[in-house]
Amino acid sequence: LALEVSVWPYAIPRRWNFHTMGQFIWENVGRFHGQEANEELYQRYYDFLLEHRFSPIEQYRRNLSPRMKLEECLRRGMNTVYLSGNFNATAAEMEQLKKDYETVKRLGALDYALIYIGDETDKWDEMRQRAGLIHAHLPGVMVMIGGSVPRPELLGHIDIYDPQVGGRSKVYSLQQEDTRLIAESQQRGEEFYWYVAAGPEYPHPNVQVEHPLIASRVLFWMTWKYGVTGFEYYCYNIWERNYSRDPARRYPNVRWQADGWSRGWPTNGDGMLFYPGPISSLRFEAIRDGIEDWESHQVLSDGVEALRRRENPGRDAALIARAEAMLKVRDEIVAGFNKYTFDPGRLLAERQALGDLITEVVRVLGNADELEKAAAARIGRQAALRRAMLRERHVQACRILNVEPLSQAAWNALW
């Protein structure tokens, strides 16, 4: 058997560019594993999630998450920290948040810190009030709302938007004709993520068993095409319906029930990306491939910037043009929110072409160091824009609440 291996001369960054988040139910790990649920087992789940580039976050709990091994998660590349996933603005909650805030600052993770204040809601007054408390009393922390686009009622208050990919809702869905809102939000320094859950329905891409497996991967090509930088999935492991106190009536002694939160709907696998063990699903493996595809596009984008920074960028014009065309994602791969290829061969061929093109860029640059320099410059620009935005919102919130804002020197010292 003759085997020829071609190794691309680059790697996707260890420090994640793409953001992932959602609800990991630790109680379900304990419920299924019983006395085996020890520190070694929990470490396996941490490793499993981080290896799939998913943050071990508790999106709907009022605690700092990851709740354990936060420093290790940051060291391994994770870039999302929740101070709270269910903020209700009580006095006791604010006191705890201030303690956790100090922990995050000590770890140098303030740029990754957020508080989740609402989920598929239209209570705009309440959302503005919650955001103001955070901006005033926890300076530098981002405010995230799930299930909302940048709308007039929230502008200037929300730092991370997270609508559903398409769908029917006029409250929490991003429609195809409104994709301009993504770039407009990012130009202000805000982050823009999106999600799928029980919806959107086919032919929009989703990560349920009923959907073609390619949808779990091509979703992230769509995510790159529209400039979205994060993916939120409401729950990783809804396993409760497969648990019984009677071992004889519990998996693996009975058939696994794949229906998730939306029981009765044709949405098997909804809220269930993997299984006790941890045992992965084909969908979760395809999701990781998709996230790595997204990261590879970012590598190519940094490569284009590195080429432009060379002394004579005109000599690389043809290569830059080819790279820019690749970065747009051809319509044959993704043409819209509900129009994308169902041909795995076509997608894999495009992935091969992406890797080969990055290889050309690296060879012209001489090595991958120039990619890293371009990435560092990009991250620095993004951080400066975000911090300036948060500074303005801190001052505005302090003025409304009659609180003394941080001086510019104290603000700069946060980082």
Image: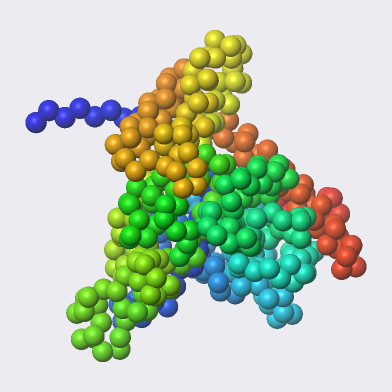
Closer to the camera, 415 or 141?
141
Task: Where is residue 164? Give x, y as percent.
Answer: 55, 57
Q: Among all residues in the image, which is located at the extreme left? A: 1
Q: Is residue 344 visible?
A: yes
Please state if 124 lies on the left or on the right of 84 as rendered. right
Identify which residue is drawn at 59% across, 14% down.
Answer: 313
> With respect to residue 354, does 34 lie above or below?
below
Task: Where is residue 201? Give x, y as percent.
Answer: 44, 59
**Quadrant placement of the N terminus:** top left
Identify which residue is drawn at 66% across, 46% down.
Answer: 181
Identify which residue is drawn at 58% across, 62% down.
Answer: 169
Task: Where is residue 75? Give x, y as percent.
Answer: 50, 52
Closer to the camera, 122 or 410?
122
Task: Where is residue 259? Give x, y as percent.
Answer: 35, 71
> With respect to residue 11, does 172 lie above or below?
below
State how the image is colored.
Answer: rainbow
Please state if 374 lies on the left or on the right of 125 as rendered. left
> With respect to residue 207, does 187 lie above or below?
above
Identify which residue is drawn at 88% across, 65% down.
Answer: 400
Please state if 275 lies on the left or on the right of 252 as rendered. right
Closer to the camera, 400 or 83?
400
Q: Is residue 186 visible?
A: no
Closer to the camera, 97 or 412?
97
